Image (cartoon, rainbow, N blue to C red):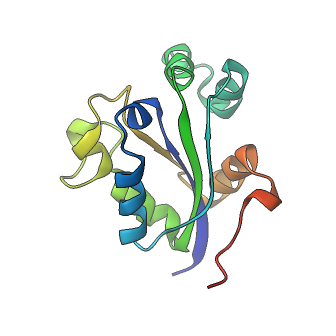
């Protein structure tokens, strides 16, 4: 399995519910390492830029409003096959369809407020990590 990085965002509902530690525990138990992290309040411009791929979709404005409604926790995760591992522990986008024991099945209340974001491919992950962190902001583990 290749060592790779992926972006994770604990969305405003996850931060509001005080789930940061619980979610980080799940990262680590799955073999993922946090190599960059920051809490931030997204501006409208930042949210629109990050989710630009969805600009033409009917849910875009609601997504931007949701992502700017409170602070988020943004982190880069690293590990063997990190993208697939993280997507598995996140669960399906719709929490009603997410496997039992996943983050979304356990904590999300709706498809609109589904606790976490994760990159879907290596190229996407690289672009998303660069959107929030400079090279100096990512700190690979050395021990």
Task: State the image coordinates of residue 102 (x, y, percent, origin top left).
Answer: 27, 53
Count of numbered tags: 0
Q: Residue 48 occupies which quadrant of the picture? A: top right
Q: Is residue 66 left or right of residue 2?
A: left
In the displayed structure, would residue 31 be above or below residue 45? below
Determine which quarter of the picture holds residue 135: bottom right
What residue is at 48 percent from the left and 18 percent from the top? 59
Q: Is residue 139 above or below residue 42?
A: below
Instruction: Estimate the x, y position of residue 46 in percent, counting from the top left.
Output: 70, 28
Residue at 59% from the left image edge and 27% from the top image edge: 54
Quadrant of the frame with the C terminus: bottom right
Task: Work out which residue is located at the far left of the displayed protein and give it.
Answer: 100
Determine whether 47 is above or below 39 in the image. above
Tell me which corner region of the image, top left, top right, bottom left or bottom right, holds residue 94: top left
- Using residue 99 as the reference point, say whether residue 26 is left or right of it: right
Which residue: 22% across, 52% down?
99
Q: Is residue 74 left or right of residue 88?
A: right
Q: Nearer the viewer, residue 16 or 125?
A: 16
Would you place residue 93 above or below residue 76 in this image? above
Q: Position of residue 37 (x, y in %)?
A: 61, 53
The residue shown at (47%, 35%) is 11
Can you give x and y, in whole percent of width and height, for residue 35 in the image?
A: 62, 65
């Amino acid at each position: 399995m290749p060592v790779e990085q992926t972006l994770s965002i604990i969305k405003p509902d996850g931060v509001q519910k005080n789930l940061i530690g619980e979610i980080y525990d799940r990262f680590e138990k799955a073999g993922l390492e946090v190599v960059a992290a920051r809490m931030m309040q997204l501006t409208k411009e930042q949210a629109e830029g990050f989710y630009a791929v969805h600009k033409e979709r009917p849910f875009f404005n609601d997504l931007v409003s949701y992502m700017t409604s409170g602070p988020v926790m943004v982190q880069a995760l690293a590990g063997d096959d990190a993208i697939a591992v993280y997507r598995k522990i996140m669960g399906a986008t719709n929490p009603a369809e997410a496997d039992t024991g996943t983050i979304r099945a356990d904590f999300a209340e709706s498809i609109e407020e589904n606790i976490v974001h994760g990159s879907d491919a290596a190229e996407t992950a690289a672009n998303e990590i660069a959107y929030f962190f400079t090279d100096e902001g990512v700190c690979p583990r050395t021990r």
